[in-house]
Image: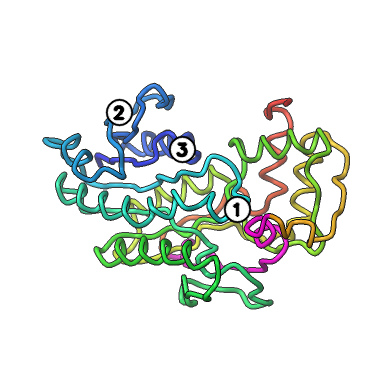
Amino acid sequence: MRVILAGATGTIASELVPRLRAAGHTVLGLTRDPARLRVPDVRPVVADVMDGDGLLAALDGVTADAVIHEATAITRTPTRHRDLYATDELREVGTRNLLRAAELVGATRFLTQSLFLGYGWGDHGPVTLTEEAPFAELTGGPFDRHLRALRSNEDQVRGAGGIALRYGLFYGPEPSTFRMMAMARKRMLPVPRPSATMHLIHIADAASATVAALERGGAGEAYNVVDDEPVDMADYIDAVAAAAGARRPLRIPGWFLHATPYLHSLLSGTRIRLSNDKARRELGWAPAYPGYRQGLATLTSTSPTN
């Protein structure tokens, strides 16, 4: 297939593009700055996803079979709600513009990046959630802006016969993990108590699931793209520090993070367990790194030192 990739300079692209190419697909990478497009074997298409008319003009005369929406405005772990506002816009306006672009180029497949936290920031108890669980239900609080964006993204895409990939938290050979390792070496990565329970996904596994969904995913479906092991974030942060060769991180009360309410909810207030059975069954996919320990073990000799 000829695939248009929005977010071609983002975190997942470094793993996704080689897998698309290895599977025989041609990749056209949407970017505002072609100088940032460092992944080889990608034809750049210079356009801003948020500029609908400009995007259509840049793609005039282009044909493609599929569009993959991986565009976000997240450059580091969000700590405040406003850190996600630009990404919220990409999930609403950017998605709408990309769907128009898909129609222009003749694409019949459309995949979008969604997020496991669309099930809700908060304590979901011991139940394991499937894709049938309520998604992006508003709570009347500060998370509603993000939930509306996630709902808009999925409603637009799935309503048009596309596919939503509800990724876990990315980790692996990517900037946020390396940043955490550097912070651990400097004793700047404390562990809140109590800590959250969440699901991760190694970026290599996120990429392989995306290719599987492109080739085998059902129209209008959503898939949890997470590993097999829900993780206590205290254990994960300890493991990141160990992979970095750092001492065990300090423990702090969770209320220390109240000044950064989004980070507090992410690291201390959320408890969620998810099933990836649907992705395994329908996509023929399984994570190469079923748990974070296997994934972090590959980083000890490759991570930056500062």
- Please report the bounds of the magenta region as a residue range: 260-281
Indicate the position of residue 3 as horizontal and vertical percent values.
28, 41
| Label 1, residues with CA under 10 Å away: few <14, some 14-19, many ≥20 | some
Residue at figure coordinates x 73%, y 25% from the top left: 305
Q: Secondary structure at mark 1?
A: loop
Q: Residue at x 53, y 65 (%)?
A: 143
Q: Residue furthest left?
A: 61
Amino acid carrying mark 2 in the image: Pro
The numbered disc on residue 33 is: none
The prevailing secondary structure element of the residues shown in magenta is: helix
Q: Which residue type does callout 1 highlight?
A: Arg
Mark 2 vs mark 1: which is more N-terminal?
2
Q: Which corner quadrant holds the N terminus? A: top left
Question: Can you identify the residue that label 1 sits on?
Answer: 80
Q: Please identify, in this view, whether the residue under mark 2 or under mark 1 is nearer the observer.
A: 1
Q: Is residue 198 above or below residue 49?
A: below
Image disc number at residue 10: 3
In this figure, which residue is indicated by the disc labeled 2? 44
Question: Is 216 on the left-hand or right-hand side of 242?
Answer: left
Secondary structure found at label 3: loop
Which quadrant holds the C terminus?
A: top right
